[in-house]
Image (cartoon, rainbow, N blue to C red):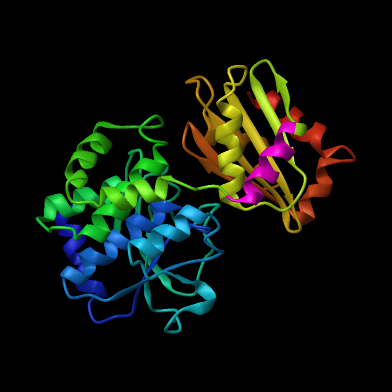
Amino acid sequence: MDKNSFFEMLDYIRDKRVFIQTHNFPDPDAIGAGFGLRGILKHYGIDSTLCYVGQIDRINTRKMTELCNIDIYPEKSLPTEMGKDDPIICIDSQKGGGNIIDLVGDEIACIDHHPLVVSEGYKYLDVRKTGACATMIAQYYQELGIEPDKDVATALLYGLKMDTMNFTRGVTQDDIMMFSFLFDRASNDIITELSMNSMEFSDLQAYGAAIENIFVYDKIGFANIPFACADAQIAVVADFILALDEVDVAVIYANRPDGIKFSVRSEVIKVDAGKLVYASISDIGSGGGHAFMAGGFIPKENVKKLGEYPDNAIRERFLENI
């Protein structure tokens, strides 16, 4: 981290109403990183509000907020109204990204592990490659000499485990080092509880729909979930399809009232998931992400551009770019 820039940012936001915004429909990594950052700001005498747009749609993520005593608010239920001059720190997300709604406040800082979208307009920017954003916040604690409490350490460790898929996806040396830093400070009992009973009945419906609609072309797996489905559910189905021996790249998409949501996974170096989804739908939607994990969205008004047979059109777009 750039300590000088970080402390300059702290001086700027001091005595202001500060908001820490995760990406839409936040996962354990985004929430853990945001909660950890809130603890650092509190250490320096700065109050902040952790917020998001959408909903927390996974049972284990909801349990995480309860067991780790995390106060996080949907944008429509903020304890204080956000003004246009109130500073926002984007965590595990970036303004201009396809997975974050632009709120009324002023995005003055960004801490993220996704590929950089735009560097202008921030007073503080820390975007670099790690398996999890929680890893970056854990490094802040270590480099600043701040001791995380048990709730923070547990949330960061759980976010780290989940975003790296238990250290099997996108892992860097930093992730391993921060696992060691957090391990003795976290609650193993809570980590164990969060790892159990993590599925709901709606997950089974999404799995079933994907299995019924799967097509595999030369190790590229496509599956349509023909009903509204939460972001996190589409993501776990993508991981499930990618686990098939016959699949190296998974493209999963769900039909929603507002459009089509995509989750893309790749386990081969030659296919960059983020570049693939961007190249395949950017003319009618938005998308991007990591080389191994990405997402995208086609709004309702553009779905008609896929023609009479949208499933065929989607498969053709992705296969052509692969």
Residue 18 vs 273, above or below: the answer is below
Residue 203 vs 167, above or below: the answer is below
Q: Quadrant of the C terminus?
A: top right
* Residue 110 visible to the viewer: no
Q: Is 99 in front, or is 147?
A: 147
Estimate the x, y position of residue 27 in percent, counting from the top left: 46, 53
Q: Residue at x 16, y 70 (%)?
A: 44
Q: Is residue 206 magenta?
A: yes
Q: Is residue 148 left or right of residue 122?
A: left
Taking the view exactly as shown, the residue that stands out farthest to the bottom is: 80
Estimate the x, y position of residue 296 in percent, counting from the top left: 61, 45
Q: Residue at x 65, y 43 (%)?
A: 204
Residue 110 vs 81, above or below: the answer is above
Estimate the x, y position of residue 219 in percent, counting from the top left: 64, 18
Q: Which of the 4 image quadrants contains residue 83?
A: bottom left
Estimate the x, y position of residue 183 in percent, counting from the top left: 21, 44
* Residue 258 visible to the viewer: yes
Q: Which of the 4 image quadrants contains residue 312?
A: top right
Residue 262 vs 229, above or below: the answer is above
Residue extent of the magenta highlight: 200-211
Q: Is residue 76 left or right of residue 285?
A: left
Q: Is 300 in front, or is 256?
A: 256
Q: Residue at x 45, y 84 (%)?
A: 81
Q: Is 180 in front, or is 124?
A: 180
